[in-house]
């Protein structure tokens, strides 16, 4: 985890640093691989690297990592060649390319004591991207089988070489990277946690613990308070479990705040589907169905750590969706906070029910913008796969999210909310049903949520696929929880303070 990785900033020549490995960049220059920022290395070392590139068939393509002996002209014993891909039309290095190259190299060096990053870092923006990618790649999940001394442990020390190392801008960029990576890692840890250890009550306890000593205040509504407050979605979804639901409210409210953003996260700590039970295979990753709530918790903590001048309320809608004699049934009618009724046609469409309660509660405080984030629909994966998230909602807020995602390096795609699909959720039994047209199911879910937002500008982020990586690790993304959404949300909040 991030806590065991130290990040240093230096302007010293990498060849003379007492380090185990030096990471350098190789670009794919129209099919011809070449070193970038090669002047940081001695001439003899550069010659040796170029020879190794030819012998090993190094291409410089993104994601490619090669290790070679460093030779006698540097203190390190190992040189690591990380691919940056092709340069832009202006020969510039993209920030996300730097993040991924640094992350891929650091992840490949897991268990190494001291790693020096000699990548193109001529300004604070590039320094921040390298620091962020390297720290994200240094993640090591805290599981039940590996000791901290194992080769799978994170790199102990990262040292980033830049001529701007002494500048305030570079130091600020590195500090932001530290805070952001800590938030992403904290989100990953929660997503990876076993559901017998992470459930609504324990999640609420973690939120209290994580906010101690910060400027974030926490309020927790237990099941009795939820019943008294008319939170029918949370009560209905959680009533089948022996572990009752919780609604956690986080408030960060600095004195000079001029805007107020509400962040709402789906927190289904395990989703069996309820009585509309999932197939066994589909349940294997359903501990990750609380990734939205985890992202909200750690985004609020990161915003507070960076002292952003914006008020943020975070809402964690926490429940465990289980089948039992007390579980809600298909055709039950429940009443959401605020009085709107919902006919539950499928108990596996539960995320929208807990989000509805939290969206109403968030809207009651009249924020300027509401953003919800959720592993909401399998239809998101059908439409966009497991690496691209969806965003829908009010036009202006949707565009702001997309702009923030572009700066942060996360992939989001705009989706519509066709009003024609709303009629498919009509029912004579209630104000709305929790299911509608099968085709366009992601959009139907968004339209359902829209019913509980009112007039507040709003965006809905569906991260169902990207929240959990069930395949091989890639660049700075590990297997398991990814922490998707945190970088976009934090960048969005930062932009809101400038707007």
Image: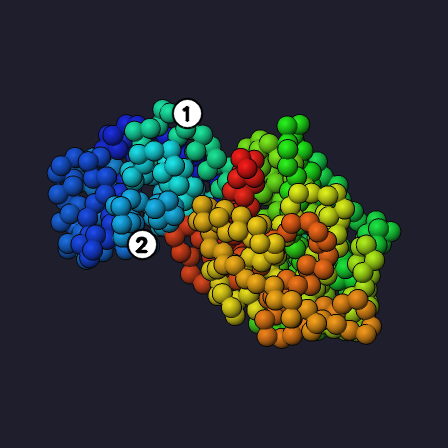
* 479 lies left or right of 71: right
What residue sits 76% from the left and 46% below the top?
364
Q: Residues within 10 Å of mark 1 (few under 14, many from 20)?
A: few
Residue visible at 13% across and 37% down in the picture: 43
Does residue 298 show up?
Answer: yes
In-front residue for pair 388/222: 388
Q: How many marks?
A: 2
Q: Quadrant of residue 471?
A: bottom left
- Secondary structure beneath dot 1 equals helix
Above or below, comparing residue 391 to residue 112 in the picture: below
Judging by the rendered image, the residue that carries numbered circle 2 is 62
Can residue 140 be seen by looking at this rendering?
no
Question: At 14% from the left edge and 44% from the top edge, which residue is drawn?
Answer: 48
Q: Quadrant of the C terminus?
A: top right
Residue at figure coordinates x 64%, y 62% from the top left: 446
**Residue behind mark 1:** 168
């Amino acid at each position: 985890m991030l806590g065991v990785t130290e990040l240093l900033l230096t302007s010293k020549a990498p060849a003379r640093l007492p380090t185990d490995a030096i990471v350098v960049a190789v670009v794919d220059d129209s099919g011809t691989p070449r070193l970038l920022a090669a002047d940081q290395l001695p001439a003899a070392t550069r010659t040796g690297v170029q020879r190794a590139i030819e012998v090993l068939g190094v291409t410089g393509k993104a994601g490619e990592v090669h290790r070679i002996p460093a030779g006698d002209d540097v203190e390190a014993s190992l040189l690591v060649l990380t691919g940056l891909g092709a340069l832009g039309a202006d020969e510039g290095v993209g920030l996300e390319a730097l993040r991924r190259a640094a992350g891929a190299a650091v992840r490949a060096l897991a268990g190494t004591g001291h790693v020096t990053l000699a990548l193109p870092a001529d300004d604070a923006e590039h320094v921040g991207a390298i620091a962020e990618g390297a720290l994200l790649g240094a993640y090591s999940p805290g599981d039940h089988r590996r000791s901290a001394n194992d080769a799978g442990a994170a790199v102990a020390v990262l040292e980033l070489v830049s001529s701007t190392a002494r500048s305030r801008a570079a130091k600020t960029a590195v500090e932001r990277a530290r805070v952001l990576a800590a938030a992403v890692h904290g989100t990953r840890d929660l997503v990876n946690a076993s559901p017998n250890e992470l459930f609504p009550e324990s999640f609420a306890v973690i939120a209290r613990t994580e906010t101690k000593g910060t400027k974030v205040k926490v309020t927790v509504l237990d099941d009795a308070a939820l019943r008294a407050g008319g939170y029918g979605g949370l009560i209905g979804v959680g009533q089948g479990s022996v572990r009752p639901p919780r609604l956690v409210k986080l408030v960060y409210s600095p004195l000079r705040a001029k805007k107020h953003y509400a962040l709402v996260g789906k927190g289904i700590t395990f989703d069996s589907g309820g009585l509309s039970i999932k197939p066994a295979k589909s349940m294997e990753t359903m501990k990750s169905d609380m990734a939205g709530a985890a992202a909200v918790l750690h985004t609020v903590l990161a915003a507070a750590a960076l002292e952003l001048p914006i008020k943020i309320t975070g809402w964690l809608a926490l429940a465990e969706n289980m089948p039992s004699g007390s579980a809600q049934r298909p055709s039950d009618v429940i009443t959401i906070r605020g009085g709107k009724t919902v006919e539950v046609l499928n108990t596996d469409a539960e995320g929208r029910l807990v989000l509805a309660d939290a969206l109403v509660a968030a809207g009651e405080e009249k924020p300027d913008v509401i953003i919800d984030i959720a592993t909401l629909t399998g239809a998101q994966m059908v439409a966009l796969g497991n690496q691209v998230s969806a965003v829908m909602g009010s036009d202006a807020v949707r565009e702001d999210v997309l702009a923030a995602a572009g700066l942060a390096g996360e992939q989001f795609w705009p989706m519509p909310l066709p009003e024609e699909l709303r009629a498919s959720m009509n029912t004579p039994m209630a104000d709305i049903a929790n299911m509608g047209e099968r085709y366009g199911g992601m959009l139907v879910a968004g339209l359902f949520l829209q019913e509980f937002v009112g007039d507040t500008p709003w965006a809905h982020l569906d991260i169902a696929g990207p929240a959990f990586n069930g395949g091989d690790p890639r660049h700075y993304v590990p297997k398991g929880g990814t922490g998707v959404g945190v970088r976009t949300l934090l960048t969005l909040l930062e932009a809101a303070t400038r707007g």
